[in-house]
Amino acid sequence: QVQLVESGGGLVQPGGSLRLSCQASGIIFSRYAMGWYRQAPGKQRELVAIITSGDSTNYADSVKGRFTISRDNAKNTVYLQMSSLKPEDTAVYYCNARVDRNTFYWGQGTQVTVSS
């Protein structure tokens, strides 16, 4: 059974930082591209960042220079370090694991709220 369990969300003031974690089980983690997506109320889910099995990364323009995605294959975990957070970063953040176009999994999501 595949499980992706996110953690690290919460309430943070503008300009603050958070680190999200997503631990995977039931998959050969090192073979999967891992991504973080987010969905704000009334908006579609959007890609935030992705890291391939070869450690190549890609970011949404809105988070470049502020967010960093990384992975630890020994711990089956992907991270999203978020800095200089803005109110518009408020959303539910979802972890995604994908090995090909037909094989992918989602976590349950973790809420990030940026507010003073």
Image (cartoon, rainbow, N blue to C red):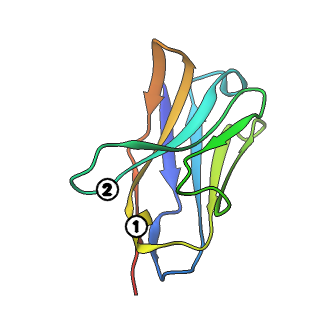
Residue 114 locus on image (x, y percent)? 42, 74
Q: Residue furthest left?
A: 42
- Up-down: is 40 above or below 89? above
Residue tagged by mark 1?
Answer: 88
Nearest the viewer among 53 and 109 is 53
Up/down of 14 relative to 36, above or below:
below
Depicted 98 relative to depicted 8: above or below: above
Number of other residues with Cα within 10 Å of mark 1, as a class: few under 14, some 14 to 19, many 20 or more: few
Give the quarter of the image for residue 33.
top right
Which residue is at a point 73% across and 41% down the rendered structure image? 75
| Label 2 element class | loop
Residues at marks 1 and 2 touching, judged by CB atoms closer than 8 Å: yes
Q: Is residue 30 left or right of residue 113?
A: right
Q: Which residue is the extreme one toward the front?
A: 61
Say which quadrant the C terminus sits in.
bottom left
Residue pictured at 63% horizontal, 55% vertical: 64
Residue type beneath disc 2: Ala
Q: Nearer the viewer, residue 10 or 101?
A: 101
Which numbered disc flags the more N-terminal residue, 1 or 2?
2
According to the image, label 2 marks what residue? 40
Q: Residue at x 64, y 64 (%)?
A: 66
Q: Amino acid at mark 1?
A: Glu
Q: Which mark is residue 59?
A: none
x and y percent of residue 93 in the render? 43, 52
Residue 113 placed where, x, y %?
Answer: 39, 70
Determine if residue 105 is in view.
yes
Is 77 displayed left or right of 47 in the figure?
Answer: right
Cα distance between the residues tagged 1 and 2: 9 Å
Residue 1 at least partly seen: no
Specify the quadrant of the image occupied by residue 50. top right
Under circle 1, the secondary element is: helix
- Residue 3: x and y in percent read 48, 33
